[in-house]
Image (cartoon, coloured by chain):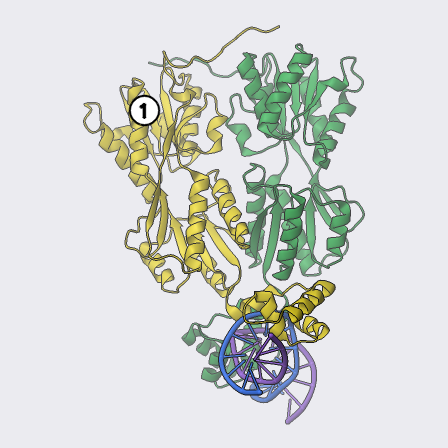
Chain colours: A green, B yellow, C purple, D blue
Amino acid sequence: MATIKDVARLAGVSVATVSRVLNKNGYVNQETELRVLAAIDQLEYQPNLVARTLANKRSGTIALILPDITNPFFPELARAIEDVARSHQYTVILCNSDDQFAREISYVELLAQKYIEGIIFASNTLSTEDIIRLKNQKLPMVVLDRALDYGYCNVVRCNNYLGAKLAVDHLLSIGCQKIAHISGAAPFITAMERLRGYEDRIRTYEWSSPDLTEPGHFTLEGGRQATLELLRRHPDLDGIFAGNDLMAIGALKALRQLGIEVPRQVSICGFDGIALTEITEPELTTVAQPIYEMGATAAKLLFAEIQGTLENKQVYELDVSLIQRASTERSGDVVESKDSGRR
Amino acid sequence: MATIKDVARLAGVSVATVSRVLNKNGYVNQETELRVLAAIDQLEYQPNLVARTLANKRSGTIALILPDITNPFFPELARAIEDVARSHQYTVILCNSDDQFAREISYVELLAQKYIEGIIFASNTLSTEDIIRLKNQKLPMVVLDRALDYGYCNVVRCNNYLGAKLAVDHLLSIGCQKIAHISGAAPFITAMERLRGYEDRIRTYEWSSPDLTEPGHFTLEGGRQATLELLRRHPDLDGIFAGNDLMAIGALKALRQLGIEVPRQVSICGFDGIALTEITEPELTTVAQPIYEMGATAAKLLFAEIQGTLENKQVYELDVSLIQRASTERSGDVVESKDSGRR
DNA sequence: ATGAAAGCGCTAACAC
DNA sequence: GTGTTAGCGCTTTCAT
């Protein structure tokens, strides 16, 4: 591997000059520049990025800390982040925290030692105090789905509260008379906001009741169990708003197991808009978050902060949208082609 | 941030001594060691990993190059690799190549400049020659699903040929009389081996025919289209072996759209064993690859190569296994509970 | 057992 | 315009 010294020697100049043409800063004569370029070419010289990082403290690397890449919400987010990182010639380190506090902390320490330039947190165990403490280390950082409104950190999130209302409104509009909610894991702001949206929307109905809500921990199995429990308590419910798509799919499984038809007897609406919602039968109505856009936005904010072109910290709230599919199609709606004849 | 110099000064020793206790190599007196440790503690010293990398060329970072993390096969693989990397105190850089040759090349160059210590290739555009060339740069590397048997590189893969036979055997065993195959993207060895397994297994049947095979490009939509085409050509086919689960799901969608019942009229078997196969209706029979284990194996091999404890390059072939589910349940098999009564 | 000093490869004053 | 040189923070000979 050729070094900057080799290039300098071959071009008959000093390393400073080579460095200047490399970084396109400082004055350098046309001719000498050409000579340097030729030398670089001839030696197939590639700058050593580690040395460069040591000298100027910029590693060209950011990190993404998320609970588990295996959770279907995150691959698209990760993809978006990597895409914008690549467009900035940056590289991204992937960290699975399993929502373990200790893991997140040890990651952050390790990453800091590597001169990582910024972190995107899509994980949820750090307290607001932790985040603030981290911020004091001057490490650029943007977080997803956090309840920080104090300007410590840029936040990207969706309007979960409104999204929940959208879901319930939709279920009401197709004629549901008793709508249950499967809520997400309690500490998370996304879960709490969706629950609040649901409650506020059904509050005025005489059938509304606290025990129409059951936690499902954001997992498929949790959604399945919650559905069974809800039906035990309320055999007459005819609509389910699940706090995320995974739980909605669990609900679908539970209902199928019980021989209850979806959407005829019970309609289901999920939340998130992950790709899985298109492969269930029936396909799942969901309140879609613009997942890719969230990731891209977070990454762009991070780079803005890294480059210092970001004035103050803000909360960026993106819009959700209801995607209506078969799991909420009642009579009068689109009819599925069934047994359209063959053979 | 405290440096090694600060520690040395506070402990009243030289930086060399501090370095020795840090790396636990070379002789150092018990007492001095204690003093150094105390100083480290007091200053909350953390070694600068970039400086260390520059000095000894080891970055504590590996890279994973895959086509697209959004493809449901890869998150679990990535998770496995990150898990074993973390257990080695390594960090992993995620790269989406979209199977673009230029992108892979530019990644490899960039990564080399960062003193990455090894690469896991789960992407498929590099030719054997490219790989060999890369290997000559002495960069530890393991590849997935490659047809390299020449000892240039460690390879992890599954027995795709056998898996395909397993699938066809199963379809035959449940009574299928005419089995079609939706093949994967032509250049990939996985696709070719599965096709070969299918062909070899049905060769002896009088209904076997080249036009019972249709490419589906490993995508859901491709699987859907291929199914429509196959049914046009062979309205009487009653079994489909898809080259991967995504295409099997596409087949499921096509059949549903046509009002053809699965598994009663047509049975379907996929390949890969991704999580999605459990959320379709009916759930999908599939030839499962041990995805997590493949990732973990690849990572362990890479670390063995990095540490120089790996004698020679080999091909590690893991076993696939048939997971039978509802998409291939014929009369006489398990009966699904339907309309088991409620309300 | 410990220290001095020469790298690792690059950047950025500062001098000319 | 270009060169000299002092870092960046750590590792590792080579003396002692």
Left or right side of B94 for B134: left
- Camera sees residue B135: yes
Q: Which residue is mark 1?
A: B170
Q: Is residue A305 above or below residue A208?
A: below
Q: Nearer the viewer, residue D3 or B52?
A: B52
Residue A271 position, x and y percent, is: 64, 30
Residue count near mark 1 (Cα–Cα under 10 Å), binned few <14, some 14–19, many ≥20: some
Q: Amino acid at mark 1?
A: His
Q: Is residue A335 above or below residue A135?
A: above
Q: Nearer the viewer, residue A338 or A203?
A: A203
Considering the image in quadrants, where does the C terminus of chain B appear?
top right
Residue B150 position, x and y percent, is: 28, 54
For mark 1, give the secondary structure. Answer: helix
Residue B247 position, x and y percent, is: 40, 32
Q: Nearer the viewer, residue B54 or B13?
A: B13
Question: What residue is shown at x 76% (from left), y 57% (from top)?
Answer: A136
Left or right side of B138 for A235: right
Chain letter for the residue marked with disc 1 in the picture = B
Considering the image in quadrants, where does the N terminus of chain B appear?
bottom right
Residue B144 position, x and y percent, is: 39, 47
Left or right side of B198 for A112: right
Question: What residue is shown at x 68% (from left), y 64% (from top)?
Answer: B45
In the displayed image of the protein, which residue is found farthest to the front?
A: B30
